[in-house]
Amino acid sequence: MSAGMRVRLISLAIAVLTILVLVQATSAADLTNKELLGKFLFFDTNLSSPPGQSCASCHDPDFGFADPDHNLPVSQGAIQIRVGNRNAPTVTYLATAPDFTYDPDTGASKGGQFWDGRAFDLVEQAKGPFLNPVEMHNPNKKLVIHDIQKADYAPLFKKVYGKNIFNNVENAYNAMADAIAEFEKSPELNRFDSKLDYYLRVDKSVFTDQEKLGMEIFQGKGHCLGCHAFPVGSTEPILTAFGYANIGVPINPDNPFYTTIPSINPDDGKIIDLGLGGFLQTLGLKQKAYEDQYGKMGMPTVRNIALTAPYFHNGVFNDLHTVVHFFNTRDVTEEHWPSPEVKANVSTVVGNLGLTETEEEALVAFLMTLTDGYKP
């Protein structure tokens, strides 16, 4: 047997084992056929070019469905020397995000996907990474669908979307994104089983005094609710308002995107991430309409935040203590924080909260209760 044949057989065996494991893991969640298909697509490493990268590569379930590589501030693509310009956020609880809206008269924006809101909904978001040159690097939709047709779950794809679904590449590609979005709406990514959830629905004695203090600060002195909504009486808070804000995050000098190849980043180290404003600028709006949104990034849920370091769109901070201290003291001169990456439109809601060290530690302790999978 040739070396090439052995490699192909090993690859096939790994693929079959992966699908068997996924099927076994799915039984408890009771996924529908469409959700199960979406799960197969989400974890399939054969849908990148070259093979080896899946959605789960940057959204690993063991890391809150965020990037597992805490040594890189941004996410690495199928081609190892290429990286994206942003840190991959968690995809848990994104199913609850409303479709993207923007009112040019008031400047109010809400919902959508990606840090800058450029994807209208989950389906549009799922289409993007497969063709992105710094993510899954496929040259076109036809190649993606060709690889899906060869997969062991192809019969399930036809069962869900019809036996002729592969006859039209555009329809099949849309169906692929629809299935992935359906999986992201499933109970596996929307578990509501953290320690906070247990506290809210079952037993309030489960919180320590420090965690209770942290929750009080989160709901009051910490000014967290404007971005990470926690409605009174809610038993399943999403902990995001799905809005956009510039909170003055500094440039990350360790971002390898600055020195990537010119065809991907022609501006090298001079590039500034304009966030929502940069996306709106592509829509042909009046100058003030998009300039007033420069630097604003989507407000992520803080659920599973203990697992999803590094933090913010550019991965500039590596631990929660630093994040909380930044929110607390960003505008305190003696702290010497670097200047914001985008100096316009910086929120003044945070930056000088006056939290003591004890209160900062309590807030971190509360954030640690937001991890899915709590067992009392």
Image (tube, rainbow, N blue to C red):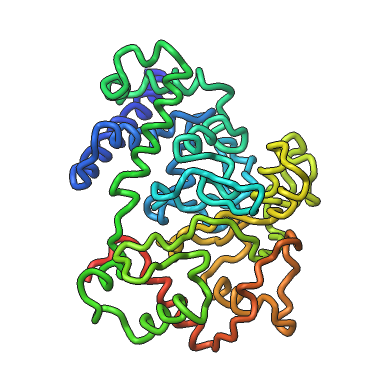
The one of 252 and 10 positioned closer to us in this rendering? 252
Q: Position of residue 184 (x, y in %)?
A: 37, 43
What quarter of the picture does the N terminus occupy?
top left
Q: Residue at x 61, y 55 (%)?
A: 297
Where in the figure is residue 242, as x and y percent of width and height?
Answer: 50, 55
Residue 354: % across, % down? 59, 86
User: Going by the picture, which residue comes out furthest to the front?
Assistant: 105
Foreground pick, 95 / 373: 95
Q: Residue at x 71, y 74 (%)?
A: 337
Taking 82 as reference, is 239 above or below it? Answer: below
Residue 268 is left or right of residue 330, and the answer is: right
Q: Splitting the image into 4 quarters, where does residue 108 fall?
A: bottom right
In which quadrant of the rendered view does residue 367 lie? bottom left
Quadrant of the rendering where the C terminus is positioned: bottom left
Location of residue 155 by image quarter: top left
The relative height of residue 120 versus residue 165 in the rendered view (above or below) is: below
Residue 11 percent across, percent down from the top left: 38, 29
Question: Tag count in the figure?
Answer: 0
Would residue 4 be visible to someone looking at this image?
Answer: no
Left or right? Give the position of 118 relative to 365: right
- Work out whether residue 369 can be spotted: yes
